[in-house]
Image (cartoon, rainbow, N blue to C red):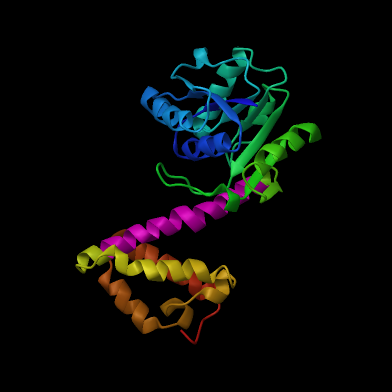
Amino acid sequence: MKAVILGAGNLASSLAPALARAGVEIVQVFSRTEQSAARLALCLNNLQATRVLTTSSLKDIKPDAELYIYAIRDDALPEVIEQVAALGCGGEALHMHTSGSAPLETLSKCFRRAAVFYPFQTFTLNAEVDFSHVPIFIEATDDLTLGQVRTIALLLTQNIYVADESQRKRLHIAGVFANNFSNAMFAIASEQLQRAGLPFSVLLPLITQTAQKVHRMSPKQAQTGPAARHDLGTIAEHLEKLGGQEQQIYQLLTDYILQHISPDTEN
């Protein structure tokens, strides 16, 4: 299967090499930034025999590929899809976007064979991802197309789920809370440690243990800390040390734990 990758950012830079290793032939990479396309192509050229073409112009997208993967920002997706459709890249080609929020209709209104291929993971440049542990959520215009999408997903992982737009949006929200917001908490924690003259590394064992616990028990069961203990004295001391938005965030999260998560009297 010959594939064109549209996008060369965090997700594409992990997904495209994984597909190449699995035997999908990447023939072209598009990115608005030629440097990004060239970086990803260089990586792919080390993984497959066919040399990967690059372009920063949608007018130069190859119209004869069998698979088009759109790994680009949601706000840019409709415009890119419409321009690719105008090139006549329809027919029997399969078009998949990787968004957790964009509906299937974003593609299906332009292409007969359209699908969603959403790897549920955090992606960062130069941070290798083992796709065998990554759940992939799929949707397609028809059962035959869904079967082909599932076959592609199976090249990477056994963790495959069929999910419609409503399910994916709720999943995306969950991901924002579990990953994006928790990382923002790490940033706040890092600032607190800097003020105390301590390195961020002292938190790493705690972060690791916290993540490992929810593999064995529910998040509610794993909750510890002053709010879970209803330790109002410690909470007041912490709030006194904080100011501005950090104080507001601490209070908001504390109130949530007090109201929605059972107290952990042992910790």
Residue 243 showing in the rendered view: no
Question: Is residue 83 visible in this depiction of the protein?
Answer: yes
Image height of 165 relative to 53, above or below: below
Residue 181 lies in magenta, yes or no? yes
Residue sitting at 42 percent across and 44 percent down? 124
Check the image and report above or below for 209 versus 172. below
Please name the residue shown 59% across and 12% down the image.
Answer: 87
Numbered marks: total: 0
Horizontal and vertical percent position of residue 243:
27, 65
Magenta-highlighted residues = 167-192
Q: What is the x, y in percent for residue 150?
A: 71, 40
Among all residues in the image, which is located at the extreme bottom?
Answer: 266
Q: Quadrant of residue 37?
A: top left
In the depicted view, which residue is nearer to us: 181 or 54? Answer: 54
| Residue at image location 53% in from the left, 26% down from the top | 49
- Image height check: is 132 above or below 201? above
Give the side of residue 101 with respect to residue 225, left or right: right
The residue that appears at 38% across and 60% down in the rendered structure is 185
Choose between 127 and 252: the one closer to the eye: 127
Residue 156 covered by magenta stretch: no
Residue 76's spot in the image, x, y percent? 50, 28
Q: Position of residue 121 (x, y in %)?
A: 53, 49
| Vertical position of residue 160 compared to residue 28: above or below | below
